[in-house]
């Protein structure tokens, strides 16, 4: 397998499945050798560089040897490669449990940590986080308990990877007749696969599923599709989730924590589950009257249109009637609006907007990519012309590709061993409509906001000035990591920005004033329900991870939905089987979306007061937030930018709940 970089310092992606295992084996042997050398140092000769940094860099070298193989398991067109890379990830996660629980390495670093140290702030924070990491890797356990800990973690790692694989490879669809496509636009229909018997195939991928649920007139077809959608991942994933919950609880108890949530929150802004529940329940109380009012209005509208006397909105009806209501009463038609948002125009406008705000430019560049659809850019400083980062965009769906929208930090910015700076490489992977013969790729406005959101993660990674990889870019607390990206979403609602990033694909006209005003007037339509749904996800996650025993994850999902969101779910479905966040990284952390959105809106409020194109404020945000990575405590970063702690008022006002004080 080739090295991670080509000779001119850019990434390459032409890996072969057969190269993976031998490369990993050689890299692991080198990692063990590097760690042995660290342990062998006499304690009196230990320094930050030869102990703490040596530990960091040993793992970096290991990762570098494997290059982009982990990332390619999400985006490669070669199923053999994807399977091999996922199998290797499972194997590596097993080895990493053993390597991360080497007592001799822990003792060596602890011997250094126990001396009277004079460290720079970022170094002290790195060491503090490293020691918490060691504690949570079982290093303070007895030999017997450590063996148990390792076995539990190996089992858990298998379940997490298998869960993700089951979601990624889950295949189901609905074949519909031409009549059942009533309500769908011609461009949507033109992109559907036709079956041999003349039907049209609707997959469970977002670009197929969401528009169909919003616009298809056939109740029966929507009902069938919604049922299939909420069984993604399969019943196996329900079992994998519940087994994982059991293992997480056992691991937390072994480490001396009351619950898995207590373990995860120790090093986050919220600090403990009680504070999270207080935050969520307070917000739930504020949101419920708003959501009830919205639900009542929508139910009355549905009953009027259907001549029915329903007492509730059913799961397969909600998106359809909400879309219809918005078209008729708010005169907002997402299908019409998207005609003004060709993806090329949106992307160009977005790069220009945030380039100006944060002092950078984006230049198209011809470097190796993993698929012909991928576009690449170099990010350059306006002030001195220096290369800051490389940035890729992989926007269209394809077989076997990652199903959602996400930012991938391919190579983190950091200080290299030779003292030079490692240029970051960052990618957005999304699934928006491909261009067809007649139309370019057109984005719905919610896809525009998603793009702006992921771009916030891109900038956080690209503009980092953190010296060490463990603190680079988005390596911040999980209840803060979404704040910069959520802040960038706010620009996708600003009238001047909407004019700048819109151009009708036929006429070239920007978004008309009348349509723009209607969009803004409808902005908070349904926001009570939307945020209550987010609140449900967060409480569901926190409930599962604070329970004294493993709960029935399906019953808990249905019970909490009824209590919090106040709407029914479809029987014999198990939506948690595709709830990837709860298995892969956001466990006991989903609340972070709402927590950080409060901070994000407070950040944006500063721009509202001082000018949304204010470059001085943009550069301050770059300096105090984006460049810092995890080198400063998050509460301090908020304080440094705002001059105070965050407040909930701007968030409540922004969603139409109440005036901020």
Image (tube, grey):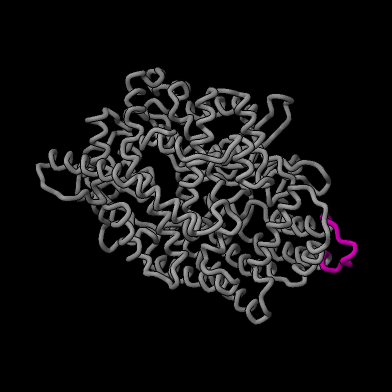
Q: Is residue 657 magenta?
A: no
Q: Residue furthest front?
A: 661
The one nearer the camera, 527 or 40, is: 527
Q: Residue visible at 53% across and 74% down?
A: 250
Helix, strand or loop for the magenta stretch, by majority: helix
Q: Residue visible at 27% across and 37% down?
A: 323
Occupied quadrant, residue 353: top right
Q: Residue visible at 65% across and 47% down?
A: 633
The range drawn in magenta is: 38-49
Left or right: residue 646 compared with residue 574: right
Q: Where does residue 372 sit, x and y in percent of width and height?
A: 55, 39
The one nearer the camera, 469 or 638, is: 638
Q: Where does residue 454 sit, x and y in percent of width and height?
A: 52, 40
Q: Is residue 42 magenta?
A: yes
The one nearer the camera, 567 or 219, is: 567
Quadrant containing the C terminus in the rendered view: top left
Q: Where does residue 460 sit, x and y in percent of width and height?
A: 61, 40
* Number of numbered tags placed on the structure image: 0
Q: Is residue 411 visible?
A: no
Residue 308 vertical placement versus 259 (above, below): above
Q: Is residue 204 visible?
A: yes
Left or right: residue 102 compared with residue 553: right
Residue 311 vertical placement versus 421 (above, below): below
The one nearer the camera, 27 or 526, is: 526
Left or right: residue 102 compared with residue 558: right
Q: Residue visible at 83% across and 46% down?
A: 418
Quadrant containing the N terminus in the rendered view: bottom right
């Amino acid at each position: 397998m080739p090295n991670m970089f080509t000779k001119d310092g850019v990434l390459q992606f032409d890996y072969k499945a057969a190269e993976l295992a031998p490369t990993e084996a050689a890299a692991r042997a080198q990692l063990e050798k590097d760690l042995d050398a660290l342990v062998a140092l006499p304690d009196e000769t230990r320094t930050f560089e030869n102990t703490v940094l040596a530990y960091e860099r040993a793992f970096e070298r290991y990762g570098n040897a494997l290059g982009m193989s982990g990332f390619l398991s999400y985006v490669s067109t070669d199923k053999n490669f994807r399977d091999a890379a996922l199998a290797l990830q499972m194997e590596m996660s097993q080895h990493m449990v053993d390597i991360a629980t080497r007592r001799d390495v822990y003792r060596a670093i602890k011997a250094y940590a126990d001396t009277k140290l004079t460290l720079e702030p970022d170094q002290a924070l790195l060491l503090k986080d490293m020691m918490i990491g060691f504690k949570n890797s079982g290093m303070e356990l007895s030999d017997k308990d450590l063996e148990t800990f390792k076995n539990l973690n190996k089992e858990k790692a298998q379940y997490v990877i298998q869960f993700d694989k089951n979601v990624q490879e889950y295949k189901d669809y609905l074949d519909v007749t031409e009549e059942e496509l009533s309500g769908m636009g011609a461009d949507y229909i033109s992109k559907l696969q036709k079956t041999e018997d003349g039907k049209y195939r609707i997959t469970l991928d977002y670009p197929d599923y969401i528009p169909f649920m919003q616009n298809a007139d056939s109740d029966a077809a929507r009902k069938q599709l919604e049922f299939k959608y909420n069984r993604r991942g399969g019943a196996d994933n329900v079992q994998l989730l519940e087994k994982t919950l059991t293992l997480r609880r056992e691991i937390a108890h072994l480490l001396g924590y009351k619950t898995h949530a207590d373990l995860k929150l120790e090093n986050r802004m919220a600090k403990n589950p009680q504070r999270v529940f207080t935050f969520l329940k307070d917000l739930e109380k504020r949101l419920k009257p708003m959501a009830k009012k919205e639900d009542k209005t929508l139910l009355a509208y549905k009953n009027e249109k259907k001549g029915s006397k329903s007492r509730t909105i059913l799961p397969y009806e909600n998106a359809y009637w909400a879309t219809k209501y918005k078209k008729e009463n708010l005169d907002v038609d997402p299908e019409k609006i998207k005609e003004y948002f060709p993806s090329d125009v949106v992307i160009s406008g977005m790069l220009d907007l945030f380039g100006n705000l944060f002092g950078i430019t984006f230049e198209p560049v011809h470097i190796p990519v993993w698929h012909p659809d991928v576009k690449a850019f170099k990010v350059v400083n306006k002030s001195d012309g220096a290369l800051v980062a490389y940035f890729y965009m992989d926007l269209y769906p394809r077989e076997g590709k990652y199903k959602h929208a996400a930012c991938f930090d391919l190579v983190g910015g950091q200080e290299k061993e030779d003292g030079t700076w490692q240029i970051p490489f960052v990618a957005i992977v999304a699934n928006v409509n491909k261009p067809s013969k007649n139309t370019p790729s057109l984005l719905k406005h919610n896809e525009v906001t998603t793009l702006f959101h992921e771009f916030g993660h891109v900038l956080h990674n690209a503009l980092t000035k953190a010296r060490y990889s463990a603190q680079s870019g988005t390596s911040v607390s999980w209840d803060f990591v979404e704040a910069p990206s959520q802040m960038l979403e706010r620009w996708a609602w600003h009238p001047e920005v909407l004019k700048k990033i819109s151009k009708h694909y036929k006429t070239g006209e920007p978004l008309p004033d009348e349509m723009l005003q209607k969009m803004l007037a409808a902005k908070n339509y349904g926001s009570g329900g939307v945020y209550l749904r987010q609140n449900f996800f967060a409480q569901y996650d926190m409930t599962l991870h604070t329970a004294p025993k493993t709960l029935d994850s399906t019953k808990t999902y249905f019970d909490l939905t009824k209590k919090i969101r106040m709407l029914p779910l479809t029987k014999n479905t198990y939506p948690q089987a595709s709830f990837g966040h709860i298995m892969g990284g956001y466990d006991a952390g989903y609340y972070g979306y709402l927590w950080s959105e409060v901070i994000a809106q407070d950040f944006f409020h500063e721009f509202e007061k001082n000018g949304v194109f204010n470059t001085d404020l943009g550069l301050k945000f770059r300096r105090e937030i984006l460049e810092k990575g995890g080198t400063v405590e998050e509460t301090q970063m908020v304080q440094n930018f705002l001059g105070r702690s965050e407040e909930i008022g701007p968030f409540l006002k922004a969603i139409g709940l109440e005036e901020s004080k």
